[in-house]
Image (cartoon, rainbow, N blue to C red):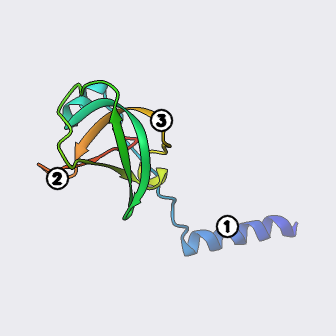
Amino acid sequence: MRRPVTTFIAAAILVAHGVAPAVACRCAPQPLEAHYRSAAVVLFARVAGVAQDGPDLRLDLVPTVPPYKGGIAPGARFVTASNNAACGLAVEPGTELLVFGEEEAPGSTTLRLSTCN
């Protein structure tokens, strides 16, 4: 009989002190056309390298065909969050991707990739 009371008390303590919810990547479902419209660059590419770049990962991408939209400006950087909880891509060299790169700011040469795009 004591076990249900103990379980109830433990649950009450957790609720009273609050349990922080886990932060997880959430994306609104969108049709492929919407991703295409919002992207600055759309292309197929192979990941040649991955390196830490501050809080992000920098992806060295090699296009495998000419871009379908936009172009890769000289000095362009492709970045993604360093973990999947922040919608980052988990990629390794050799991975092939369909890239929908979004500018971090208008006119920026930094293009962000995520599991949402």
Q: Nearer the viewer, residue 103 or 70?
A: 70
Q: In which quarter of the image is the N terminus?
A: bottom right
Crowding at mark 3 (Cα within 10 Å: few <14, some 14-19, many 20+): few
Could you tell me which residue is drawn at 43 percent across and 46 percent down? 49
1 or 2: mark nearer the eye: 2
For mark 1, give the secondary structure.
Answer: helix
First-in-chain label (1 vs 2): 1
Question: In this orientation, which residue lies closer to the viewer: 48 or 104?
Answer: 48
Mark 2, other Cα within 10 Å: few <14 / some 14–19 / many ≥20: few
Amino acid carrying label 2: it is: Ala
Residue furthest out toward the right: 1
Tell me if 98 is positioned left or right of 35 in this view: right
Q: CB under 8 Å between callouts 1 and 2? A: no
Residue beneath label 3, please?
95
* Callout in the foreground (2, 3): 3
Measured as percent of width and height from the top left, residue 44 is found at: 34, 28
What residue is pinned by disc 2?
105
